[in-house]
Amino acid sequence: MRNILVTGGAGFIGSNFVHYVLRKHPRSHVIAYDKLTYAGNLDNLEDVADDSRYTFVWGDICDEENVDHVMRAYRVDTVVNFAAETHVDRSLTEAGSFVHTDTYGTYVLLEAARKYHVERFHQVGTDEVYGEVMNGSAAEGWPLEPRSPYSASKAGGDLMCLAYSTSFGLPVTITRCTNNIGPYQYPEKVVPLFITNAIDDQPLPVYGDGTQMRDYQFVLDHCEAIDLVLTQGRPGEVYNVGTGVETRNIDIARMILRLLGKPESLIHHVTDRPGHDRRYSVDSEKIRALGWAGRHSTEQALEKTVRWYLENEWWWRKIKSGAFRAYYQKQYTDRLAHLSNI
Ligand code: NAD
Ligand code: TYD
């Protein structure tokens, strides 16, 4: 891992990973490659901008020429692909960009990785590719049954990675992790949306009855898992990454309000997400056997996250007063017009 290409490095998990690698691997050079979509933000990388081991390159993973140029110019030996369209709600109204980036973009990166004989191509995947898991926990060999355009596009990316491993012997690994929370998460996702709304005494829009469940992990625990798979994981293998603890959305809302000292009357049940997956759950024994164990409980992860948003209003207020506003209005105005307090 001398020259690591971190695609999507200006996004939430990607920027945390850039910070993590610069701290953990003093001899590595990190090239963050990002298209800076609405979710990409150079503020996330402001504090490493002067680090000589870090370079930012603006670019699209679907742009074959630019990807080829970066791989060659920086002698990339390791690719970690975070670049993706990531929000399920947006995938319900604009699926095309998800198919393009999450599936086709992954193919473009794989081709370049193959051409330049990279030592490792790591794909950052999601537990959502297993679909709704109503009983038990999905192991890596479970069938992929994605149900949203987002998860279907991510499944396409994963399958291309496995195909490049089988067909061309490309040293590919995949992690499929559960919901991350922590610093720099764009406030369209439920946890930062609820925290920042609650700070401003605005409603917390809980979809449906709020009994859907997610497994929330602290983003740096996930970064450690990726690092471990990069160094100890077997090429061609998939590793699930989850805490094994699921929390209902309504309880996440209540925990956030409790941490902020805000009333539960801010909770509003609104129209549900179409096709809403009720539960995700992964079996993470395989990565635990490699030695990974998340360091944070859900409560600790949430507490750190709430504290970060309280201490970094400069970061999220800019976002919430910009283009995000139009998105929020489109996504929530009708929903909140029919709001019902609990
Ligand atoms: P994010 O939306 O915060 O960031 C995505 C980044 O990718 C942004 O910086 C964006 O500008 C960039 N990007 C988008 N399209 C691009 C393109 N065509 N070319 C180059 N850059 C592009 O996402 P995130 O939450 O940090 O997720 C990172 C990865 O982790 C994604 O692959 C996602 O599927 C996966 N993942 C996320 C979670 C989660 O809870 N956030 C859970 C499981 C898996
Ligand atoms: P989200 O953060 O969008 O992640 P994902 O759907 O990819 O897991 O949503 C997490 C959960 O929170 C999911 O069950 C949907 C729910 N949710 C709400 O109840 N209200 C909201 O405003 C949002 C964005 C999500």
Image (tube, grey):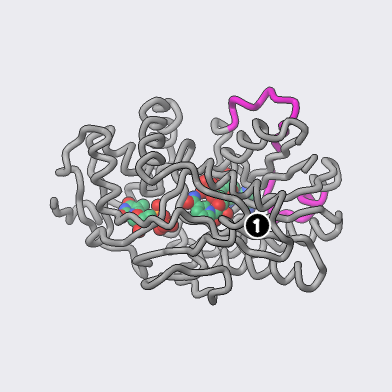
Q: What stretch is highlighted in magenta?
A: 45-68
* Other-residue count near label 1 (Cα within 10 Å), few / some / many at <14 / 14–19 / ≥20: many
Q: Quadrant of residue 174?
A: bottom right
- Mark 1 lies on residue: 123
Q: Looking at the picture, which amino acid does disc 1 mark?
A: Gln
Q: Residue at x 65, y 48 (%)?
A: 228
Name above or below for residue 18 compared with residue 177.
above
Q: Which residue is drawn at 25% across and 58% down?
A: 210
Residue 56: % across, % down = 69, 35
Residue 333 relative to residue 192: left or right: left
Secondary structure of residue under mark 1: strand
Give the position of the N terminus as an image quadrant. top right
Name above or below for residue 101 compared with residue 132.
above
Residue 236: in sight, yes or no?
yes
In reply to whether residue 60 is colored magenta, the answer given is: yes
Depth check, front residue: 76 or 86: 76
Depth check, front residue: 18 or 218: 218
